[in-house]
């Protein structure tokens, strides 16, 4: 069982995972934000690499990452951040990245550096397992999680491929569209989580389902944890950091973490 999956198991299947853009609002501010999540009860962190064409990201995250790119962000900065966070906390830190930056760095070189700084693995939203042979091999070699996405539009055959290729958890996309806070969670998330439960049982794969895209309140966290093992939130954290710095972020972290304590039915 990987470090990320162990952390989810330790949460009794009530995991809370937070997304933050690497380098935002600056390098030290990003480290401080990661520490706030770790101290506030989050189970794991997704550190997003800024990218010039973020097809999955909503406007809040796009604006944050564009500002980071404009000031000259470099990938090594993300590795330095992970090294500092893992030195100060035990929280698993995953990198969420589009595939092109990893290809440019070199797949095995990227994996080796991520493992060296204590990173837990990669979430690759635009890489499907069939095209991920080099990454899967590198992840195995360096003992890293490889997290692929399952979407409401995925066939059962596609869900099987994702379950068999993933390690750590399955990123369960709650709705068709981009990231961003929503007033109500799409019912498609529950349907997809149920389908994944059926398929993982059939395959004998004990892999957590973590639901992301649109989770912005403690109540939504509680709702998602009624039918999945983890809830993923991002835009709400970035907006808090943008609007009120570390103090506002810690307030939002506390509200979201409170949702893990509510038994939703």
Image: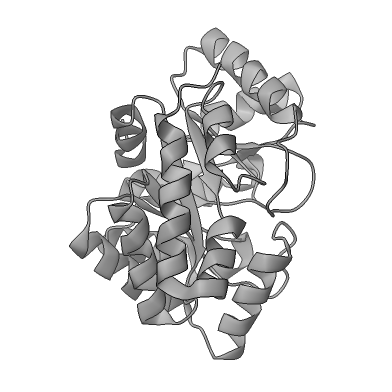
Q: Nearer the viewer, residue 25 or 91?
A: 25
Measured from the top left, where is residue 260 in percent x and y?
43, 34
Q: Residue at x 53, y 25 (%)?
A: 228
Q: How many numbered marks are there?
A: 0
Q: Nearer the viewer, residue 130 or 212?
A: 212
Q: What scheme was used to colour the molecule?
A: one colour
Q: Residue at x 52, y 31 (%)?
A: 222
Residue 201 lies, with reference to residue 165, above or below; the image says above
Q: Nearer the viewer, residue 151 or 188?
A: 188
Q: Is residue 168 visible?
A: no
Measured from the top left, where is residue 136 in percent x and y?
48, 44
Q: Is residue 226 visible?
A: yes
Measured from the top left, where is residue 91 in percent x and y?
29, 50
Q: Residue at x 53, y 10 (%)?
A: 201
Quarter of the rendering containing residue 117: bottom left
Residue 103 lies, with reference to residue 216, above or below; the image says below
Direction from residue 106 to residue 109 in the image, left or right: left
Name of the residue lying farthest toward the top: 202
Q: Nearer the viewer, residue 120 or 217?
A: 217
Name of the residue lying farthest toward the bottom: 71
Quarter of the image where the C terminus is located: top right
Quarter of the rendering containing residue 68: bottom right
């Amino acid at each position: 069982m990987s470090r990320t999956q162990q952390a989810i198991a330790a949460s009794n299947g009530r995991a809370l995972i937070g997304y933050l853009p690497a380098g935002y609002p600056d390098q030290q501010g990003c480290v401080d934000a990661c520490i706030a999540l770790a101290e506030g009860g989050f189970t794991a962190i997704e550190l997003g690499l800024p990218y010039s064409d973020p097809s999955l990201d909503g406007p809040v995250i796009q604006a944050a990452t564009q500002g980071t790119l404009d000031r000259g962000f470099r990938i090594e900065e993300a590795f330095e951040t992970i090294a500092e966070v893992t030195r100060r906390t035990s929280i698993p830190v995953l990198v969420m990245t589009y595939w092109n930056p990893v290809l440019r760095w070199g797949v095995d070189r990227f994996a080796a550096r991520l493992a060296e700084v204590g990173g837990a693995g990669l979430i690759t939203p635009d890489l499907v397992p069939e095209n991920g042979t080099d990454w899967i091999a590198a992840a195995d070699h360096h003992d890293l999680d490889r997290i692929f996405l399952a979407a409401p539009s995925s066939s059962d055959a596609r869900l099987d491929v994702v379950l068999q290729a993933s390690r750590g958890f399955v990123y369960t996309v709650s709705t068709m569209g981009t990231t961003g806070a929503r007033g109500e969670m799409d019912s498609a998330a529950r349907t997809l989580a149920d389908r994944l439960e059926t398929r993982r049982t059939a395959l004998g794969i004990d892999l957590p389902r973590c639901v992301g895209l649109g989770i912005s309140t403690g109540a939504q966290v509680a709702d998602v944890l009624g039918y999945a093992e983890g809830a993923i939130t991002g835009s709400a954290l970035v907006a808090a950091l943008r609007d009120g710095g570390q103090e506002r972020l810690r307030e939002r972290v506390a509200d979201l973490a409170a949702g893990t304590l509510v038994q939703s039915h």
